[in-house]
Amino acid sequence: MARHQFLCPLRWSDMDADGHVSNAAHLRYLEETRIDLFGSRGFRGSSVVAQMDIDYLTPLRYRSHPVRVETWVTKVGGSSFTLAQEIRDDEVVYSTATCTMVAFDSESQRSRKLGDTERGMLEELGL
């Protein structure tokens, strides 16, 4: 199974008073990774997050080098798909997430069917 990998830089402002990266920053790292994934793989249609579940496993301390975020597809439906994501280093997983996304038509403000190109890109990353 292929995984999309993104090296996400940490920012000084991501740190809380204890020197840990805040919970909200984890969500931003996951979002930045999805943006990189869609942009680099040619996913041109709009999509929205329908549900996001995250488990914080180990505190991520602020540091100057990036953290790796891995993303893969676990399910593809007619108009929705599910991504699994991990914020990690080689030996440590800091958080895991499951993100259900829905293909979205901005004009009608409704969900839409996934196109063949989108479906193909998603299937390359899992299942």
Image (cartoon, rainbow, N blue to C red):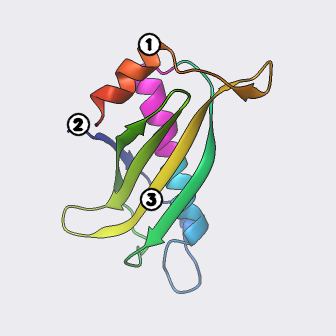
- Taking the image as shown, residue 106 lies to the left or right of residue 46, namely right
Q: Nearer the viewer, mark 1 or mark 2?
A: 1
Q: Quadrant of residue 28?
A: bottom right
Could you tell me how far apart the alpha carbons at marks 1 and 3 are, in whole angstroms? 26 Å
Label 3 crowding class (10 Å Cα cut-off): few <14, some 14-19, many 20+?
some
Q: Nearer the viewer, residue 40 or 114?
A: 114
The magenta segment is 32-43
Please tell me which of labels 1 and 2 falls first in the chain.
Answer: 2
Question: What type is the residue that disc 2 sits on?
Answer: Ala
Q: On screen, 50 above or below 127?
A: below
Could you tell me how far apart the alpha carbons at marks 3 and 2 are, in whole angstroms? 17 Å
Q: Which residue is mark 1?
A: 116
Could you tell me how far apart the alpha carbons at marks 1 and 2 are, in whole angstroms? 19 Å
Residue 101 % position (x, y): 56, 40
Quadrant containing the C terminus is top left
Please tell me which of labels 3 and 2 falls first in the chain.
Answer: 2
Query: Marks 1 and 2: CB-CB under 8 Å?
Result: no
- Taking the image as shown, residue 2 lies to the left or right of residue 58, namely left
SS state under label 1: helix
Q: On screen, 123 above or below 115?
A: below
SS state under label 2: loop
Q: Which residue is mark 2?
A: 2
Label 1 crowding class (10 Å Cα cut-off): few <14, some 14-19, many 20+?
few
Q: On screen, 26 above or below 99?
A: below
Q: Is residue 28 magenta?
A: no
Q: Quadrant of residue 60?
A: bottom left
Residue 66 visible at all? no
Q: On screen, 93 above or below 39?
A: below
Q: Which mark is residue 97?
A: 3
Q: Nearer the viewer, mark 1 or mark 3?
A: 1
